Image: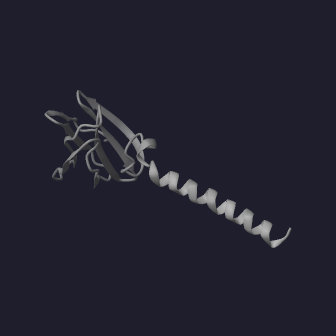
Amino acid sequence: MDSGAIRRRLGAGLAVLTASLLFAVAAPGSAQAAPAACAGRQVRMLPFSTGSVLVYKNGGRVCAVTVQKHPGTKRAVSVGVQARGHVTVRKSRKHARSSPPVEVYAGHRCVRVSGSVGSATYTSGWILC
């Protein structure tokens, strides 16, 4: 191969790489189905009328996030997690999809989670004991 053919192949490869990077940056939200804000495995999905509270566990840490049933409309979305014997940690925001994640160290304690989307709320009993 002469140097001109090598340059053409490198140029074509660079063009393909650039196009694929632009495509990946241009449409990141279209492939996202659910928030991946919490580490660990999902252990519960607690549905209510306007959304669901997703509960994840990673070792002794419990993380929860509230997602809307019909995303797209900005509504007040909140989530709270309380380990037995401790205070509730809450976060909320106005968002079109989900609440910010809340993570607490529960160890081997039971936890209570709560979530709301708009005016509808959900509060569990003591779970993950």
Identify the image quadrant of residue 116: top left
Instruction: Say whether residue 19 is left or right of residue 82.
Output: right
Q: Residue at x 74, y 69 (%)?
A: 7
The N terminus, quarter of image: bottom right
Q: Residue furthest bottom?
A: 3
Instruction: Say whether residue 50 is left or right of residue 34.
Output: left
**Residue 44 sits above or below residue 41 on the image:** above
Instruction: Say whether residue 100 is left or right of residue 18.
Output: left
Residue 48 percent location from the top left of the image: 24, 29
**Residue 32 sits above or below residue 107 on the image:** above
**Residue 59 sits above or below residue 111 on the image:** below
Q: Residue furthest right?
A: 1
Q: Residue at x 16, y 36 (%)?
A: 118
Q: Residue at x 68, y 64 (%)?
A: 11
Identify the image quadrant of residue 56: top left
Q: Residue furthest top?
A: 49
Q: In the image shown, does 11 or 31 lie closer to the viewer? A: 11
Residue 37 percent location from the top left of the image: 36, 51
The C terminus, quarter of image: top left
Instruction: Say whether residue 27 is left or right of residue 98.
Output: right
Residue 53 percent location from the top left of the image: 28, 38
Q: Residue at x 18, y 53 (%)?
A: 86
